[in-house]
């Protein structure tokens, strides 16, 4: 599903965010990307949805090298990749429903499809009772659920989550991870970049560790530390 | 597509409302610029009209000495008609001229008591083929030696002509400058709404919106600003022109006022279209820059 081949990313300011990374992530896999701040986790995720281009190497998503996509093709790549953020990135002046429907609107989907799919996604994340609330009126966990609903509303085969529990308490974090696990079991490849040791240790999934831009560990049924 | 179009228009109205003050500034600026643009067009048209009418009525008038007989005047008429450049010669005898003068002014002046003799000379009105020939023909007439005075309004025409071309050049430069200034203001207005919606744009692009999709609401916003500005300016121009034209027709009835409805309608339409184009271009430029920064 996802394959990074000898990928490096150097910024003009001299920082080497990624250094010769090769990594294969299979279809419907669930993996944790761990490492300290600045290890390159976010950069790696950004390369997948083409928010960044690598300085060297190939980034294959569904057998397509996304590095070679032209600007006009990038939107179609992104419709196949859902992204969840630590700070949610919800639109404050729109309701939960509108935030989720927004992701379908931009694809030009007909209104009836938008309504059906948005409600399905909101049901999956357990937010049906909050559809008319504004982000300000939601708890952290609910905001993250809304963000996840928006990310999966297009039924993307890949879901990327960048520190999805960074702003949440342990119980809520666990709920969110359960939700991501549920989405994974619905045939979605899930990549979670996280600092959350307890969750990684508890879930016992594949763990890929980055350190200073290098891949230092790739372990099935792994834990946060060796 | 219907759903998208509805989305674009709703989004455009949303941002229109959100930055009401800047939008009003942009609309007023477009209105002012386009009104000046239209006013210059109307001024140029009318000046051209005046020059054209005066030129077409252009005659050269030659007066004989007072004591010339009708026979002698007839001979002069034949000589004048033969001059190169002269199209037609009309003769007004001193008797006819005096009669006409008395008809025109007799009521106001007590002519019978003050003037006993006819003081007027015979006169020839010469039509010249083109206005440029006027000075040449005037000189030829004077050179004949039998004419006492030659009059023509050539200098006035020359002055009018240079006035028209000055207004045309000045107006054109002003229009170019104003259009540029207006465009900048529209670009900046829409840029503010683009900045206010940076997160929206970021998320739109993140969830797979194409650039075209992101652009439409902003372009529609620009078109709305331009259309309202252009429409207001068109209304101002139409109402003021009609009122000024009506007053001028009363005050200066001899002044030929431009009234070709087809051309006037075209000018009003150009004002509205110009506004719309400016707004559209403004929207396009501001959102394109934002998109470039985003990707």
Image (cartoon, coloured by chain):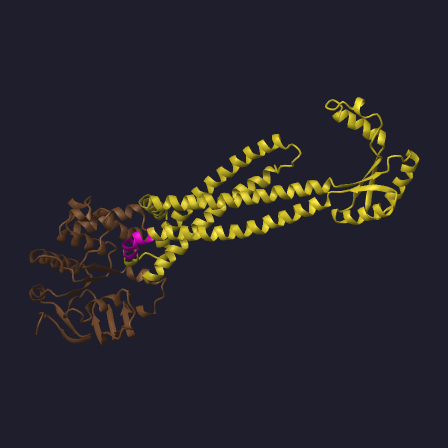
Question: Could you tell me residue B267's position as x and y percent?
Answer: 55, 43
The residue lying furthest to the right in this view is: B71
The residue lying furthest to the front in this view is: B114
Using the rendered image of the protein, determine whether residue B109 is visible from the camera's viewpoint.
Answer: yes
**Residue sitting at 84 percent across and 34 percent down?**
B121
Question: Tell me, what hue is chain B?
Answer: yellow
Instruction: State the extent of the magenta-drawn residues as a range.
Output: B193-202
Question: Tell me, what hue is chain A?
Answer: brown
**Residue sitting at 18 percent across and 57 percent down?**
A87
Residue B195 is one of the magenta-drawn residues? yes
Image side of residue B25 versus residue B97, left or right: left
Question: Could you tell me residue A181's position as x and y percent?
Answer: 13, 60
Using the rendered image of the protein, determine whether residue A117 is visible from the camera's viewpoint.
Answer: no
> How many discs mark residues in the rendered view?
0
Question: Could you tell me residue B112's position as x and y percent?
Answer: 80, 22
**Residue sitting at 48 percent across and 50 percent down?**
B178
Quadrant housing the C terminus of chain B: bottom left
């Amino acid at each position: 599903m996802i394959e990074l081949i000898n990928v490096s990313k150097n910024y003009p300011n001299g920082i080497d965010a990624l250094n010769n990374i090769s990594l294969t992530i299979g279809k419907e896999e669930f993996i944790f990307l761990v490492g300290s701040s600045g290890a390159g986790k976010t950069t790696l995720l950004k390369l997948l949805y083409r928010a960044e281009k690598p300085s060297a190497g190939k980034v294959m998503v569904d057998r397509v090298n996304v590095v070679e996509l032209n600007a006009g093709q990038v939107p179609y790549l992104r419709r196949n990749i859902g992204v969840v953020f630590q700070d949610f990135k919800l639109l404050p002046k729109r309701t939960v429903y509108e935030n989720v429907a927004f992701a379908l609107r931009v694809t030009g989907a007909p209104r009836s499809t938008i309504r059906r799919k948005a409600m399905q996604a909101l049901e999956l994340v357990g937010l049906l009772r909050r559809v008319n609330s504004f982000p300000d009126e939601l708890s952290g966990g609910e905001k993250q659920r809304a963000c996840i609903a928006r990310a999966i509303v297009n039924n993307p085969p890949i879901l990327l989550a960048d520190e999805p529990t960074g702003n949440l308490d342990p119980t809520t974090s666990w709920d969110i991870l359960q939700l991501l696990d549920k989405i994974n079991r619905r045939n979605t490849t899930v990549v979670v970049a996280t600092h959350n040791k307890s969750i990684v240790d508890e879930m016992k999934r594949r763990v890929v560790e980055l350190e200073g831009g290098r891949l230092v560990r790739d372990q099935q049924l792994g834990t946060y530390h060796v | 597509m219907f759903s998208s179009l509805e989305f674009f228009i709703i989004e455009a109205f949303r941002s229109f409302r959100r930055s009401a003050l800047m939008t009003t500034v942009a609309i007023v600026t477009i209105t002012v610029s386009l009104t000046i643009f239209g006013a210059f067009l109307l001024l140029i048209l009318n000046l051209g009209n005046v020059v054209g009418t005066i030129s077409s009525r252009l005659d050269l008038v030659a007066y004989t000495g007072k004591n010339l007989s009708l026979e002698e005047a007839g001979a002069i008429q034949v000589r004048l008609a033969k001059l190169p450049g002269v199209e037609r010669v009309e003769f007004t005898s001193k008797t006819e001229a005096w009669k006409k003068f008395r008809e025109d002014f007799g009521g106001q002046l007590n002519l019978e008591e003050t003037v006993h003799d006819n003081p007027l000379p015979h006169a020839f009105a010469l039509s010249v083929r083109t206005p440029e020939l006027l000075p040449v023909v005037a000189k030829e007439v004077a050179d004949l030696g039998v004419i006492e005075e030659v009059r023509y309004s050539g200098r006035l025409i020359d002055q009018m002509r240079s006035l028209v071309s000055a207004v045309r050049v000045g107006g054109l430069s002003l229009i170019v400058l104003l259009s540029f200034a207006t465009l900048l203001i529209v670009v900046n207005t829409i840029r503010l709404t683009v900045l206010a919606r940076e997160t929206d744009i970021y998320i739109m692009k993140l969830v797979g919106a194409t650039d075209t999709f992101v652009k439409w609401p902003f372009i529609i916003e620009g078109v709305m600003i331009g259309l309202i500005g252009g429409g207001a300016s068109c209304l101002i121009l139409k109402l003021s022109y009609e009122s000024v034209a009506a007053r001028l027709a009363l005050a200066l009835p001899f002044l030929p006022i431009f009234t070709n409805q087809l051309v006037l309608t075209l000018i009003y339409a150009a004002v509205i279209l110009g506004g719309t184009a400016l707004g559209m271009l403004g929207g396009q430029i501001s959102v394109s820059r934002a998109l470039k920064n985003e990707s």
